Image (spheres, grey):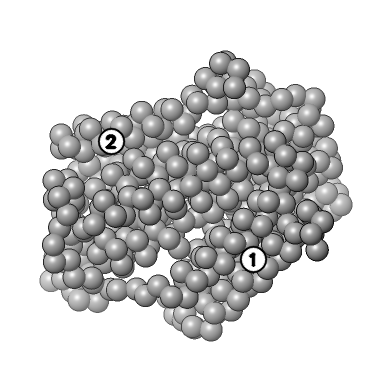
Amino acid sequence: MLDLGWAFWPLALFVFTLVIGIIAPISGVGGGVLFVPLTVAFFPFNVDFIRGAGLIMALTSALSSAPHLMKKGLANLRIMAPVVVVSMITSIIGGIVGLWVTNAFPTGKYYIYIALGIVLFIIFVVMLTSKRVEFPEVTSIDPISAKLGISGAWYEPSLDKVVEYRTTKMPVALPAFAAVGFIAGMFGLGAGWANVPVLNLLMGAPIKVATSTSMLIITVNDAAAAWVYLANGAVLPLIVIPSVIGITIGSRIGARIAVRARPRFVRYLVMGVMLLAAVLDIQKGLSGLGMI
Amino acid sequence: MKEEVVVEPMNVTFARTMEIFTYIGLVLMIAPGIIYLVSGAGFVGVESAVEHWNEPSSTFWKETKGIEIHGYSWFLNNLSYMDCLSIVGIVLLAVTPLISIIAALPKADSRYKVILGVLVLEFLFAIVRPLLMHVTGH
């Protein structure tokens, strides 16, 4: 029989990720970006194991959805491959730096809490201010994108036709993806919040292509960073398994609800919770350092 | 009438490979993981894990097993335990993008063959880096 003494936290984690999974598709805020800061704020696990679980969770979600989106023509290897040549390296470096900080310094985890809170503030601002363009107009193509022949097409049911698209500004996008890869690896966050605006607003990918290709980018970046966490023993099944099961079941329920209703207030509510988590993470970090 | 979309063979092969390995990886991760959670026994017993899961990973392993972790032998040498078997599922998930890229390589045009080739090398570096750094004493 289960001793609820030790089973309490894994069970709480399961319920918590189930709720995140349900809310994420309804609010349009990625589950990966909610998991790490909220778990840091409310659960007793070390941030090393939380980041490891966050990476595996984001990886599992992306691996489960990317193939279906690729077969529809929405997620495109032609866009993803040149981008991850850069971001895979930075996500590995992010993982190494993140684990080094917590393991090399006695107070390292508090610096990570503070940095995570600051990153959350940035994510909050990006989410609040970035617009989504359904079908951006691409008037000129940069030489790299032209040489690589980056283009694609998918059947859009709302228009009842096949939509063709091209992307541009690859040289400007690459440094942005490098920064995103580093943050994803360092904090174990899903990076859809940053990938999508870069793909959509900067490179001119239609919003559906941007969200789908972002999934594909996450599969590679998070898988590469996961090796850093595995090699340092920062992946604990006791934390990973309830999280993955919870988010998987929750996101299926959430996706069904989202088809019927996506009230705007839910998005703002979740973003408010994110802001609260940012404050709590910074407060936890500062009090750990004895500064407050 | 619904128009047909022709998806590039490189994308289709990548997607099919990813789909298959993701299913296998998920089963391999979750089935032993649940057994581990229910039984409470593993390479690291749950009671011991709970006691030290608030410590950084290096301290956690010193306290629970008296070992330092460098690389993958900590779970590869202990596959009779369900928690380590569950990690093998995670490993399979973490190697799935690499397998998918290798599968898509023959279907890619010459420019993408080069890019995907670079990705394969980067991925292999990500996997062997911890082993190389340990051997060279870093």
Q: Chain of mark 2?
A: B
Residue visible at 21% across and 58% down in the picture = A168
Counting every numbered tag in the picture gives 2
Residue visible at 48% across and 47% down in the picture = A182
Residue visible at 76% across and 36% down in the picture = B60
Q: Residues within 10 Å of mark 1 (few under 14, many from 20)?
A: many
Labels 1, 2: front one: 1
User: Front-most of A257 and A23?
Assistant: A23
Label 2 sits on a secondary structure element that is helix
Residues beneath discs 1 and 2 located on the same chain: no
Q: Position of residue A78 (x, y in %)?
A: 24, 48
- Mark identifier at residue B116: 2
- What amino acid is at disc 1? Ala
Q: Position of residue A126 (x, y in %)?
A: 46, 69
Classify residue B50 as left or right of residue B34. right
Task: Using the rendered image of the protein, determine whether residue B137 is visible from the camera's viewpoint.
Answer: yes
Q: Chain of mark 1?
A: A
Q: Position of residue A207 (x, y in %)?
A: 31, 68
On the image, which quarter does residue B112 sit in?
top left
Q: Determine whether A121 is above or below B113 in the image.
A: below
Q: Determine whether A292 is above or below A71 in the image.
A: below
Label 1 sits on a secondary structure element that is helix
- What amino acid is at disc 2? Leu
The residue tagged 1 is: A278
Residue visible at 56% across and 74% down in the picture = A271
**3D distance between C-alphas at marks 1 and 2:** 38 Å
